[in-house]
Amino acid sequence: MLGTILYGKGDVRCEEVPEPKILRPTDAVIRLSASCICGSDLWPYRGLNDVTQPMAMGHEYCGVVEEVGSAVTSVRPGQFVVGSFCISDNTCPHCRRGFQSSCQQREFMTGAQAPMARVPLADGTLVATPAMPPDDLIPSLLAVSDVLGTGWYAADAARVQEGSTVAVVGDGAVGLMGVLAAKQMGAGRIIAMSRHKTRQDLALEFGATDIVSERGDAGVERIKALTDGVGADSVLECVGTKESMTQAIRSARPGAMIGYVGVPHGVDLDGQTLFFSQTGMLGGPAPVRRFLPDLIDLVLTRKINPGKVFDLTLPLADVAEGYRAMDERRAIKTMLRV
Amino acid sequence: MLGTILYGKGDVRCEEVPEPKILRPTDAVIRLSASCICGSDLWPYRGLNDVTQPMAMGHEYCGVVEEVGSAVTSVRPGQFVVGSFCISDNTCPHCRRGFQSSCQQREFMTGAQAPMARVPLADGTLVATPAMPPDDLIPSLLAVSDVLGTGWYAADAARVQEGSTVAVVGDGAVGLMGVLAAKQMGAGRIIAMSRHKTRQDLALEFGATDIVSERGDAGVERIKALTDGVGADSVLECVGTKESMTQAIRSARPGAMIGYVGVPHGVDLDGQTLFFSQTGMLGGPAPVRRFLPDLIDLVLTRKINPGKVFDLTLPLADVAEGYRAMDERRAIKTMLRV
């Protein structure tokens, strides 16, 4: 079959790869209904993470179970499933406390930019839908797997509540999903920081009440002006750079929580600055498994439409163009027909 | 009157100072029932904070109102009051959200290692007791002003709950008060990290269930061993050094909160390490004002006895010996008879 391999900076290829097989009794093999490219795939693509050996790319997925290992009991062939990008057993102490992304058996999904994929720890990782979902919901169900789950976790970690004032730093796909999540959680005001018209429009559609296009000092000033000088109750940091983290901290009121989900690159936090800003922080890879049942339900009942975040769809063969389009910010997020 | 002035590293003196006066209509002047030395006073005393000019020391206080400015309405001469080391108006947006230590008009109390002190923003800072408290409760009421309020905030920020497993890093007075706070909040297990017998004993008396005397890797291992390999649900970081913060992060389970109240000195947090540890953090100067009414009540009804943290009492004239005793860890916390 075809699959996606990253060989080095800027060098991603669609090429023939072996079909996945059950390797352990707890595995499942699924046939993907669609796949996509993640903002985090751009870190190694841009050379910001080392690529020491060819990497099988892709960790977002939904589709139909093809085969399961002998120990798998909760899903069976023919079922439609959505899984988290973090592989988890969903039974260890960290999983039981809702932090499946720190599962004691955690692995990260790979190889899902392909028509089929092996999912380890299938019982703890996959959630089956009650019935085969209609085709038009596939993009949204795919989004649940990572990008929505991650935006949702950012809002959860930032403790968004009914009536909260929320600032979202980052207008990538995760930031936009953070807006959607904050809206669902009842935020009273959602300030999206974005300089790009198409992303601003999507943010507004997902529930943003205000757009701030400024950054740095000017961005902080605008947020302060919008909040009577107070700052936001909750800030979602959805980028992972020093600039975005600084923006997040400075946009928060004392006592606010920052949910940070962009993998930090070059982010160093000065303890004393953080102390006196009195902002709380909780981040990490999103425990999407915790949210899967609820998010799948919100999609199936058509209460949310996160699939709108995909503004480019390409056949798998054109995956390299998908990476380029996201790298050059021509696309927010690329879906791949597999 | 006598007062306490720090002139530089290791040079603290009790000497004649002017009596405090009402300077603004929102001030009160109080006659202290007792004063004390704070762990944070040791930072400049040890030369770890610059002392660019003589500093009037002391920020913990309780006592009787002597005089109030013309705008003060909530306390009156003759009342016994306890105040926070953070001066606050208790009406600004940050105060209303319970973060009085980031009040838009915040000042830090000074000059309270003396028989009398001026308290700015008296209405927002002081809380009067219903009646004159008995003498034996003075140490505990004094503790409320900072050391207990700070330990309490650490536990609150770390979200200690009924049944939580709590680790307390630091066996100074604040750490010991953190143990007391965690106990009051219903923690099921309280692990105090301490290498000193007298502090261990006090920790046990305040509610610790386990003592860990190891530090570093060995300390982390012991905490993991005590928690089935999981780590603590809540960690109270009550020191403020790189070592103690690292200890706190490594002792926490994924998803845990660290309440950190030691002013960070030389603490740099690597974003990616914090991200993948998935530990939450909230710190800062404690909003003691938020807790004052409840803590005063707990003391007056004799449900808690935080005053036990004072293991040395000296006359104000011997304040220099009080600093030395704490610096050399001969005393946990020194109370001053003023």
Image (cartoon, coloured by chain):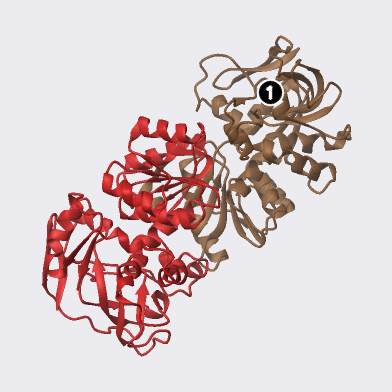
Chain colours: A brown, B red
Of all residues shown, which one is farthest toward the bottom? B70
Q: Residue at x 27, y 57 (%)?
A: B40
Examine the rendering and report whether any part of residue B104 can be seen: no
Q: In the image, what residue type sits under mark 1? A: Leu
| Image label count | 1
Q: Residues within 10 Å of mark 1 (few under 14, many from 20)?
A: many
Residue A72 in picture, x, y percent from top left: 75, 21
Examine the rendering and report whether any part of residue B221 can be seen: yes
A325 relative to B201 in the view: left or right: right
Query: Judging from the image, what secondary structure is the residue with disc 1 in?
Result: loop
Q: Residue at x 58, y 36 (%)?
A: A285
What chain does mark 1 sit on? A
**Quadrant in which the N terminus of chain B appears:** bottom left
Residue B120 in picture, x, y percent from top left: 33, 77
Which quadrant holds residue A119? top right
A218 relative to A5 in the view: left or right: left
Above or below, A247 relative to B52: above
B221 relative to B65 in the view: left or right: right
- Badge 1 is on which residue? A121
B216 relative to B190 in the view: left or right: left
Above or below, B132 relative to B235: below
Residue A62 in picture, x, y percent from top left: 77, 29
Residue B36 in picture, x, y percent from top left: 24, 65
**Quadrant in which the C terminus of chain B appears:** bottom left
Which of the pair B62/B136 is nearer the observer? B136
Which quadrant holds residue B101? bottom left
Which of the pair A221/B81 is nearer the observer? B81
